Image: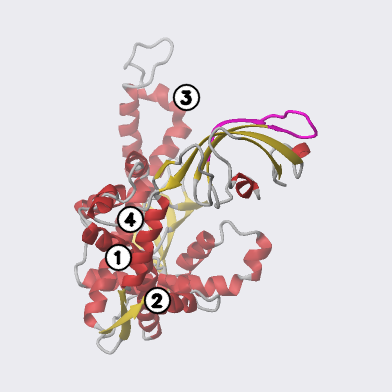
Amino acid sequence: MKVEIKSKKGLRTILSVIVDKKNIETKMEERLKELQKEVALKGFRPGKVPPEVIKSQFGKSIYGEVVDKILRETTTKAIDEKKLKVAGQPKIDLKQFGEGKDLNYELQIDCLPNVNLKNFDKFKATSFKLKIEDKIIEEKIKEIANQNKQFKDRSENEKALSGDQVTFNYSATVDGNKFDGSEGKGVQLELGKDLFLKGFDDQLIGVKKNDTKILKATLPANHPKKELANKNTKFECKILNVKKPIDRKIDDEFAKLMGAKDIKDLKSLIEKQISGQYSQALNSITKKEILDQIEKNHQVDLPQNLIDQEISIMTQNLKPEDKEKHKSNNEKLAKSRIKLGLLLNEFGEKNNLKVTDDEVKNEIQKQIKSMPGQEKMVFEYYQKNPNASQSLKGSLYEEKIIELIKSKINLTSKEINTKEAEKIIAEFNKPNVDTDKSKTTSPVKNKSKLKKNSKK
């Protein structure tokens, strides 16, 4: 194999590769011998079909198979020989091929640029430490208690009040006629929540156990049967039971019912839960502050094929007119992501950062534990989607990089309350703020999937 640099312009290098015809003939003979064991033709015993017969019948397809294999092998060797760092997928332009001829092709390669990292010592960012007010935690506990109400029977003479639970059967008619779904058994309503039909709960206030009451209500406008939408309906309700809510004492016993050790533990769990709801957004704000400075303070040449590839991914679900409308902005965002990906990747490599398979497994286990009742679904998702595990590995790698960068810069910790956090997050999420900058693309070297332009 003979490899020469035909041209080099910016990040694009074109290699000329010539593979001697004798090498191709040797590969053809080897493949024909392999096929002898596999091919079955009429008139020949298994494994005894002469190579020349196989070649006469399947020569073109075998040659194509051999050439494809040679292209994969020689492109990798050519790239390694010239010590090129490939960005994206190289392209092959076949100049000459065919039986009895040398294989001659050009390999167009977009290379990764040399990235010179500057010192991060002068970079500044704010890390937010969220203080959850006791009042917020108490309100959340009351909300949980309210969602887990207990009821006890009222006496037969006691009337239902707002907040009571009423159980009833009903039979409904529209214009005196029954309809599909007009019968209901054992329906339970907590009066005041208005979860059945508008105004229905109010008419049940004052009923007693064993009462029969006629109620009037209007069926909803989005009723599944269009002919019943907005229809005035009469409900004959037989009251089966009336229960009143029990004042639930918020103590250790309540905490245990909620899965905590005691009330102190429950408050701690709620504090962590609320903090977790804010932390992702607050961390994104800190991350963007860091990434903005990294991008601003570095100049990097970007491979055009990576830009085109990123734009394609970003706009794959857009209509052609929307792609054109936002073309300039999409290109700007694609360049930003790729530039940051190159810079972060260089920082990670220089600091020997890696993500082990065990770290990926541990993260998957965390996700499984955080979704009770859906453990099997999460586990099977990662089992059936190798790309999901690879994507998770990339996210963990980026997290490691960002955390190490934080240790290198001037990071100020600021304590804020939930109200301040909401204001900061709202400001960050305004349309004019480019939150997508926190998403980065790490170039991946791929030498096996090659695009071919054939010229004979």
Tell which tag, 3 or 1, sits nearer the viewer.
1
Identify which amino acid the numbered label 1 is placed on.
Glu
The residue pinned by badge 3 equals 57
Q: Earlier in the sequence, mark 3 or mark 1?
A: 3
Q: CA distance from mark 3 to mark 1?
A: 74 Å
Q: Earlier in the sequence, mark 2 or mark 4?
A: 4
- In which quadrant of the rendered view does residue 354 lie? bottom left
The span shown in magenta is 172-188
Q: Is residue 418 left or right of residue 411?
A: right
Q: Is residue 286 left or right of residue 452?
A: left
- Asked if residue 400 is positioned above or below residue 170 in the image, the reply reads below
Q: Nearer the viewer, residue 37 or 230?
A: 230
Tell which tag, 1 or 2, sits nearer the viewer.
1
Tell which tag, 3 or 4, sits nearer the viewer.
4
Q: Earlier in the sequence, mark 1 or mark 2?
A: 1
Q: Which mark is residue 392?
A: 4
The residue pinned by badge 2 equals 421
Q: Earlier in the sequence, mark 3 or mark 2?
A: 3
Identify which amino acid the numbered label 2 is placed on.
Ala
Identify the element where label 3 is drawn.
Answer: helix
Few, some or many C-alpha atoms within 10 Å of disc 1 (few <14, some 14-19, many ≥20)? some
* Magenta stretch contains residue 445: no
